[in-house]
Image: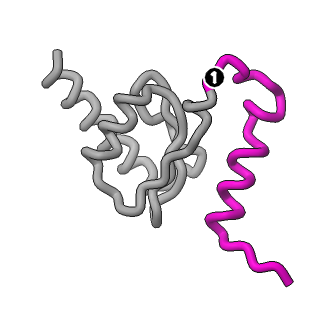
Amino acid sequence: MLYVSSLQLFLFLFRYLSPCDVAGACSDLTEKSRKMRIFQRYNPMKVAKYVKTLFRGRLYIKDVGAFEFDQGKILLPKVRDKRHFSVMSEVNRQVTHLQTEMG
């Protein structure tokens, strides 16, 4: 029997069964923006710098879950629970803070 970890299964499904791949609706995305960054620890400032710099893409935070971001902000998570919402709002606050520092 082949053993596949839940993270490996999630990454496979997220990459190969996303709406962009199925419908071709996101063909204008660059290959770089389709890659998913995996953070081993949740550090809001590091995640915010990544989101602000890359501007569009996906990320996964170990023990938290997956997120998508566009225009430098994390979008509403597909898994709508308190933990995901708090991470989304905290990272978006950090992004806003970084933007005001630079501006």
Is the N terminus in the top left, top right, bottom left or bottom right quadrant?
A: bottom right
Percent from the top left, x then y, of residue 67? 51, 44
* Vertical order, 12 against 24 (above or below): below
Q: Residue at x 45, y 52 (%)?
A: 84
Left or right, 5 with reference to 2:
left
Residue numbers of the magenta segment? 1-30
- Please give the name of the residue rendered at 48% of the width and 53% of the height, measured from the top-left corner: 38
Residue 98, visible in the rendered structure:
yes
Please tell me which residue lies in front, 88 or 59: 59
Depicted 69 relative to depicted 67: above or below = above
Task: Kindly tell me whether residue 82 is visible in this rendering.
Answer: no
Q: Give residue 95's position: percent from left, percent from top.
A: 28, 32
* Residue found farthest to the front: 31
Residue 96, image quadrant: top left
Question: Identity of the amino acid at label 1?
Answer: Leu
User: Which quadrant of the figure has residue 45?
Assistant: top left
Quick one: label 1, few (<14), some, or many (20+) residues within 10 Å? few
- At a point 61% along the width and 24% down the height, the residue shown is 30
Q: Horizontally, is 76 left or right of 21 in the view?
A: left
Q: Is residue 41 above or below residue 47?
A: below
Location of residue 17 in the rendering, given as x and y in whole percent from the top left corner: 78, 44
101 within the magenta span: no
Which residue does the numbered mark 1 point to in the structure image?
29
- How many discs mark residues in the rendered view? 1
> What residue do we see at 37% from left, 49% from top?
87
- Horizontal side of 40 relative to 101 (left or right) equals right
Q: Position of residue 41 (x, y in %)?
A: 36, 62
